Amino acid sequence: MKSTPSATILIVDDSTENLYVLSELMHPHYKVLAATSGEVALRIANGKPTPDLILLDVMMPTMDGYEVLTKLRESPATRDIPVVFLTALAEAGDEERGLVAGAADYITKPIKPVVVMARVRTQLLAKQARDWMMDQNAVLEVEISRRMAENDLTQQVSIRALAHLAEMRDPETGHHLMRTQGYVRELAHALCQHPRFSAILSEHYIDLLSRSAPLHDIGKVGIPDAILLKPGKLDATEWAIMQTHSRLGSEAIEQAERDIDMPLPFLSTAKEIAHWHHEKWDGSGYPDGLAGDAIPVSARLMALSDVFDALITSRIYKPAMSYSEAREVIAAGRGRHFDPDMVDAFLDNFDRFVAIADDSIDDNVSA
């Protein structure tokens, strides 16, 4: 890297003689700005063009070099400008004070032109290198952000594609995935300040829940059509087979985790939801008969969301309930099917759940 002739040097000294000598020394190589006081120097430094380097006298009236440097470092516009102190003070403590204050270098008077030019060139090259690195870092950050956004979109699309495999087996489900995802997110936000849930329901975890929710019924791809699409009531044997979809779903997700050989939090959450979203608060659910807080929070949120959407959606074997009827069913399941506090949050925010349903309404969703 070469020093650029367009570099701007600000020289600050209350002695006009010193200003003249330094200006004459710098002019053939750099653009020179001059100030005879700290106050003027600060105005120039905050203006345009921004100096690439400041040669700053320490001993000045009203505002000395240390105070000027402090104010330069306080301003975002000037804090990165390298400052070289010029002073007649030759004590080791003076030099140390200047460097501790943030000066890039320290030149004692009387100045030696060769030394000054060498120090100036060194500082300008260092600044040029820093600026280049900052530019490269900025470009890198933009590229990283772009790739992260691309990866995030790819992940979401992949989840949707997998979830739709299950949904395509049962065309009557319509926008079930979108609605239940919205219900889970809304219910989690409604509970995030609750003493029982505040420790787990962070914004990050709610995002994981939202991503994971569409995979809750992925296991249905393993259920025979004769059972999954049966228009009438399932017999005991058929129902036992239908219940295996929760285990099939969690096993499929677990296999995906093993295939990529690295943990992904949203997959772990998806596995919980798929496996246990049919458990009930009183222990009468499936597949493991878990009860109360033994059921993961993610699965409890999905359980309520899934049932609400099933109630307001018509099937070949049942009509859709109205929103008010579904509300009563959920309320009746408080402390039996569902976590009591989750039911309370659902009832307190019922209009929001209705709005989510209306936003992605199907012909088979009752208004």
Image (spheres, grey):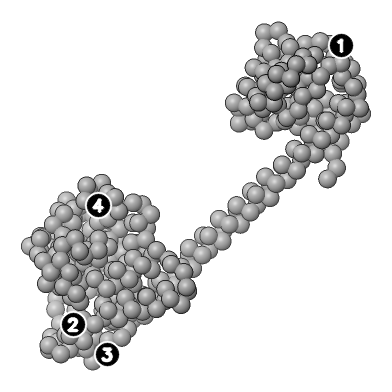
Q: Residue at x 19, y 60 (%)?
A: 293
**CB-based contact (under 8 Å), mark 4 and mark 3:** no
Q: Earlier in the sequence, mark 4 or mark 2?
A: 4
Instruction: Report helix, strand or loop for mark 1.
Output: helix
Between label 2 and label 1, give the one nearer the viewer: 1
**CB-based contact (under 8 Å), mark 2 and mark 3:** no
Q: Earlier in the sequence, mark 4 or mark 3?
A: 4
Three-letter amino acid code of the residue under disc 2: Ile
**Residue assigned mark 1:** 17
**Residue assigned mark 2:** 316
Q: Earlier in the sequence, mark 2 or mark 1?
A: 1
Q: Earlier in the sequence, mark 3 or mark 1?
A: 1
Instruction: Report helix, strand or loop for mark 2.
Output: loop
Between label 2 and label 3, give the one nearer the viewer: 3
Instruction: Report helix, strand or loop for mark 4.
Output: loop
Single out the residue that lies furthest toward the bottom.
226
Disc 1/disc 4 C-alpha distance (Å): 72 Å
**Residue assigned mark 3:** 224
**Residue assigned mark 4:** 197
Residue 204, position in %: x, y?
Answer: 38, 54
Query: Could you tell me which quadrant the N terminus lies in?
Result: top right
Q: Nearer the viewer, residue 54 or 183?
A: 54
Residue 116, position in %: x, y?
Answer: 86, 26
Q: Residue at x 70, y 31 (%)?
A: 81
Up-down relation of residue 286 to residue 198 (above or below): below
Between label 4 and label 2, give the one nearer the viewer: 4
Single out the residue that lies furthest toward the top.
61
**CB-based contact (under 8 Å), mark 2 and mark 1:** no
Three-letter amino acid code of the residue under disc 3: Pro
Up-down relation of residue 183 to residue 239 (above or below): above
